[in-house]
Amino acid sequence: MKKLTWGLLVLLSALALAGCKTDAFPDNQSGNPVFFFRGTVDGDSLALDAGVNGQYLFSGTRGEGEPVQELWGRMSSASCDDCAGSLEIAFRATAGINPASFLAPGLISFLQNGAPDKRLYRVAFTADSTAGEGFQWSLGDGEERQGGQIEHVYYDSIASTYLVCLETIGADGCSSTICNQLVLTEGSCKADFSYSPYQSGSNFIFFRNKSTATQPVRYRWSFGDGSRAGLGNPAYAYQEPGKYLVCLRITDGSGCESIWCKEIAVDSTICTSGFSYQVTTETIGDTLQNGRVMIRYRDAKGDLWSSAKLAQAADAQFEILSVEPYENNRAGKPTLLVRFRATAVLGRENKTRSFSGEGTWVIETR
């Protein structure tokens, strides 16, 4: 056995199991972090460390090529895959959905019985930039796209706020980037606006409010040169040509607040970046339960206890604390380093056990 630089041994061989593919990591790891779990099962301490007491960290994908897959990481003995004392964290992943869209800091729902309704937001983005010929989008959930007009789907079980950025690239090589917070919650207000010069090359700009909000609405404009206005549809004369960051902040009658910014050019040759969007909301049966998490624990007898398809208590939760890219495993598959904490109920036949704790794991991302 090779000497490891920080005491973590991860298997080299790829294990082929029925409907289950396991990819191993390189044999020579270095530095931090250490993979571990610290917690309790029914009040009894549970402490697991990779490279200690014969425990090792495995990761893999179940159901490759199937519509629904599982991305998992498991701490267990090198001599068996599901032996006594093993702990597995698995995420349900729908084919075609980037795992980065749900493997992100925040609360993750547990896999459950039935098919609860799920809301999705179909968002159409339109670039309204000047001197732009190339458009690169970062959509806030790990997805990136290109084009002046694109459509993307967000799911309400993953997050409600996304930082969306658009980089505009001009024919002369100029580039400009704008980022806005996209808020997708039921009944949320939305600030938006368009603009146009009085005539080509003019420094006199008309702004048109295109916000969606409950009346009455308070408008606060910032024109990027220190000047402000409180009208719904203002006009403004810039003193100098150039590029300005214009922002509209609204507060509506329900107390909802939204802000939206765009770059504008008082010179048609300047490269600017800005975009608008339209949202269509749909409700579907969540039969696939994409992104749901499962905890599987084998006790000292080797009996399997699982959170899957079990009614969870009101205080049950699985929270991802941080996520960062990790090394490719031996099969060349990308992995993520996931730090988490969890409180859940694990079941077996008609019995239940309480489970809680936190740890640092590795999850393959296909």
Image (spheres, rainbow, N blue to C red):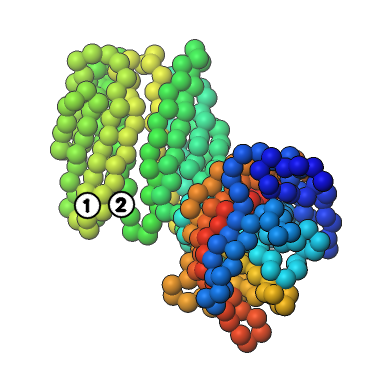
Q: Nearer the viewer, residue 333 or 204?
A: 333
| Relative vertical location of residue 170 with respect to residue 263 in this rendering, above or below | above
Q: Which residue is mark 1?
A: 252
Q: Position of residue 13 (x, y in %)?
A: 83, 49
> Residue 165 occupies which quadrant of the picture?
top left
- Mark positioned earlier in the residue sequence (2 or 1): 2
Disc 2 and disc 1 in contact, CB within 8 angstroms: yes
Question: How many angstroms separate mark 2 from mark 1 (CA)?
Answer: 7 Å
The local secondary structure at tag 1 comes to: loop
Number of other residues with Cα within 10 Å of mark 2, as a class: few under 14, some 14 to 19, many 20 or more? many
Q: Nearer the viewer, residue 197 or 359?
A: 359
Q: Amino acid at mark 1?
A: Asp
Q: Position of residue 156 (x, y in %)?
A: 47, 58
Q: Residue at x 17, y 53 (%)?
A: 216
Q: Amino acid at mark 2?
A: Cys
Q: Residue furthest bottom?
A: 350
Q: Which residue is mark 2?
A: 189
Q: Residue at x 42, y 54 (%)?
A: 160
Lateral position of residue 279 relative to residue 361, left or right: left
Q: Residue at x 58, y 82 (%)?
A: 352
Number of other residues with Cα within 10 Å of mark 1, as a class: few under 14, some 14 to 19, many 20 or more? some
| Relative vertical location of residue 250 with respect to residue 206 in this rendering, above or below | below
Q: Position of residue 41 (x, y in %)?
A: 57, 73
Residue 278 visible here: no
The local secondary structure at tag 2 comes to: loop
Lateral position of residue 60 relative to residue 235, left or right: right
Q: Residue at x 28, y 30 (%)?
A: 246
Q: Nearer the viewer, residue 201 or 129?
A: 129
Lateral position of residue 9 relative to residue 191, left or right: right
Q: Position of residue 14 (x, y in %)?
A: 82, 50
Q: Nearer the viewer, residue 356 or 174?
A: 356
